[in-house]
Image (cartoon, grey):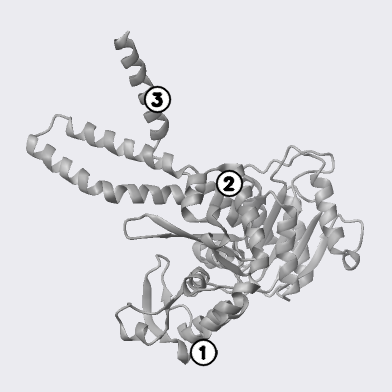
Amino acid sequence: MVARIVKASSLTRSLNYNEQKVQQKCAELIHAENYPKDLEHLSFHDRLHRLKHQASLNQRVTANSVHISLNFDPAEKLDKELLRAISQSYMEQIGFGDQPYLVYQHHDAGHPHVHILTTNITGEGKRIDMNNIGRTLSEKARQNIDREFKLISPENKKLQQAVIQKQMDETWSWNDLRLPKVRYGKTPTKAAVQKVVAYVMNEYKYTSLPEFNAVLRLYNIVADRGEKESLMYKNGGLVYRVLDDEGNKIGTPIKASEFYNKPTLKNLEKKFSVNEELRIPRARHIKLQVDWAINRHANLANVIADLHKESISVLARQNSEGRIYGMTYIDLKNHVVFNGSDLGKEYSANAIMERCGINREKQIIKTFIKKTRQATISSQIDKNDQKSISDNLEISESKILPKLLEDLMRTDLYISGSPHELLDEQKKKKKRRLGHRL
């Protein structure tokens, strides 16, 4: 058995994840512990209210949702009774035996697994300490349960942890993709691509090929027209390609006409005009989420992370120089795609970066590069080497700056301490100049 524990700030979102699986007939609720009603009499409101009521006993704790998955070897044959007993034993051993919790058995993966939803706030309003719970309590509980229920343990079968983790990630991802990503060489390529293309083509509302591709890329697929000078492009042809994890095209292209649902450019264009009207009611939701995230953080990396939590994927489009010229928003819950400019000027790439202070961050990076160049050239080295280094730094600046800006887009990464150090240094120089003038 392998256990995974995740803390979150929304009990509603965690419960909805499992309930949606139930509606899709991919899961079922098999146990409810410490609830006032029997399982068969619990409504959705009853399930959620019990957890939220207990969590509300301590308003200081924001991350009050605990979502646990227990994953078992594919060879295990575990019925509901055994899964209930294992879940109860595990919760007792990690100190959650008296908490209200729900156990869902999922059927959407190649290995048996359950999801357990609970809260870390006790009936007395105290917070259950979860620091290092995986190492101190969960791992010990796992070993005990493997022995008690005679399960196949990772040690006994020499299972690779990375393989198990990959299975878990594919069945429980932040954006809850309805289909797994296509992995070249892992499954029959044409069948896997056809399944994804048919799903995205029929379920999502997009109005252009780039928007259609924005969703397909989440599954490692792209619809390719070829080069503009090519005969395929001029004749309106379309092929589908599999991408690796770096976004590179791999494998043999498959003509759109070879698929049973005929996802050709001509048929896609028919959907573009229809979807233009169908997606309009969903625009307001995305704009509200973007505004809320920016008002909260005013930092692009954190804004994108917050939108991901709300199942809105953000794709930043860059040119060959690394300049960001467009943004695409994919609402994975409501199945709509918008270019930023289609939502309004304030949601375009330039406007979003300005609202998040990207220009200031870019200036800080330029100052850092300039100082690095000056410090390097002024060091005690051979003059010929100085010229070589200076030339190389001049050439590399155009490459360094876009890369650093890209890092700012993706994470909170700054060059260690550099923004604050540079600002402090600038203040000191200003004081020294003022002192000399006096």
Give percent across and percent down for residue 264: 48, 86
The answer to whether residue 33 is left or right of residue 184 is right
N-terminal-most mark, 3 or 2: 2
Please tell me which residue is depicted at 61% across the width and 50% down the height of the picture.
Answer: 291
Q: Residues within 10 Å of mark 1 (few under 14, many from 20)?
A: some
Instruction: Name, please, the residue furthest toward the front.
Output: 345
Q: Which mark is residue 424?
A: 3
Task: Look at the numbered discs 2 and 1 and tell me whether their residues touch, using CB distance below 8 Å.
Answer: no
Please tell me which residue is depicted at 60% across the width and 48% down the height of the picture.
Answer: 293
Give percent across and percent down for residue 174: 60, 60
- Is residue 278 among the parts visible in the rendering? yes
Please tell me which residue is depicted at 46% across the width and 87% down the height of the picture.
Answer: 256
The answer to whether residue 278 is left or right of residue 380 is right
Please tell me which residue is depicted at 32% across the width and 36% down the height of the picture.
Answer: 368
- In this rendering, is residue 63 above or below 112? above
Q: Count of labels shown?
A: 3
**Circle 1 is placed at which residue position?**
262
- Tell me which amino acid carries mark 2: Ile
Residue closer to the observer: 225 or 215: 225
Using the numbered discs, state the Cα–Cα distance from disc 3 to disc 1 in whole angstroms. 61 Å
- Is residue 110 among the parts visible in the rendering? no
- Tell me which amino acid carries mark 3: Asp
- In this rendering, is residue 341 above or below 202? above
Q: Which mark is residue 294?
A: 2
* In this view, the mark in front (3 or 2): 2
Determine the image quadrant of residue 178: bottom right
Task: Look at the numbered discs 3 and 1 and tell me whether their residues touch, using CB distance below 8 Å.
Answer: no
N-terminal-most mark, 2 or 1: 1
The answer to whether residue 40 is left or right of residue 389 is right
Secondary structure beneath label 1: loop
